Amino acid sequence: MATVQDTKRRIRSVANTQKITRAMELVAAAKLRRAQQRIEAMRPYADRMLELIGGVSRAAASVRSIPLLQRREEIGTVAVVPITGDRGLAGAFNSQVLRRAFAVERELAAEGLDVRWLVSGKKGRSTLTFRRYDLADSWAGFSDQPAYADAQAIAHALAELYVNGEIDRAVVIYNAFVSPLVQRVTVQDVLPVPEELLAGDEDEQRQAALRGDFIYEPEPEEILARLVPVYLETEIYRALLESAASEQGARMTAMRNATKNAGELIDRLTLEMNRARQAEITQEILEVVAGADALGQ
């Protein structure tokens, strides 16, 4: 049984840890508010970009001349891009993205397809390196506050691989932010541009017809050639912002649970310490009584 002094030292140690987890929870909460504001401001822009791509593509006579819109007749290599964080202490935030990425890899391998790995975040890079995967490219250092330039770097790397024929498809895997308590793992195809985006549904086409025809200057094909790279950058940037907000939400929740568990452990250790102190007092009383009886004899 631990002595009173040992239990006191454990209580002090757990109390110090509790202060750290509480501070990390508050920091994550502050960062989460900023990240949430950024993603909420980004979502309407990204949605409008999708509508713009769809509208211009329906007006274009042909999209075969645009490299990023050309679909391969046979798919041989798929680029998988998991978006993780640079730090841990965020619960299952990183592990659930990587588990889904490995599941996607197994599905692709079952179809006879090769996988090309690109990764964002130190956690994802270290895990893939530890498993001895060959990385085509990796990025790190901006998971907390991604900038548009970071999304451009990833988008340009994917576009170059696709145009050069090194990959036939690109898949991004990230945590979509739902709430501070809920992060949904999302698998999104970014290359080639999904056909349903270019074609649109019947309701959208009917609404476009009601609005009338548009005169494009320059030609729709030229506009589309400029828009598609921006679309790719926008989708990557949106995924980075979603992941950043999800990471802060997961870290805030994890640190809140850690703080609560530390408090419960302190209560349990305090009870053990009081019991040990009571046992020591009882033992001392017994020794005094035994000594008095010995002197009385």
Image: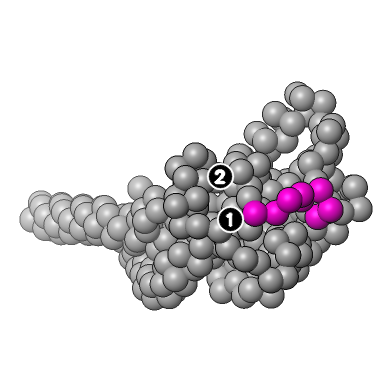
Residue 79 position in % (x across, y down): 77, 46
Q: Are marks 2 and 1 in contact (CB under 8 Å)?
A: yes
- The residue that appears at 62% across and 75% down in the rendered structure is 147
Residue 153 position in % (x across, y down): 75, 68
- The residue that appears at 78% across and 29% down in the rendered structure is 109
What's the magenta bit mostly, secondary-structure-wise?
Answer: loop
Look at the numbered disc 2 and give the secondary structure of its residue.
Answer: loop
Crowd tier of the residue under label 2, counting other residues whose Cα lies within 10 Å: few below 14, some 14–19, many 20 or above: some
Residue 166 shown in magenta = no
Q: Which residues are magenta?
A: 59-66
Q: Name which quarter of the figure residue 230 lies in.
A: bottom right
Residue that numbered label 1 is attached to: 55
Residue 65 shown in magenta = yes
Residue 223 position in % (x across, y down): 71, 66
- The residue that appears at 81% across and 61% down in the rendered structure is 157
User: Separation of disc 2 and disc 1 at Cα?
Assistant: 8 Å
Residue 91 position in % (x across, y down): 48, 52
Q: Nearer the viewer, residue 218 or 126?
A: 218
Q: Is residue 76 left or right of residue 82?
A: right
Q: Nearer the viewer, residue 230 or 182?
A: 230
Residue that numbered label 2 is attached to: 200
Q: Amino acid at mark 2?
A: Gly
Q: Amino acid at mark 1?
A: Gly
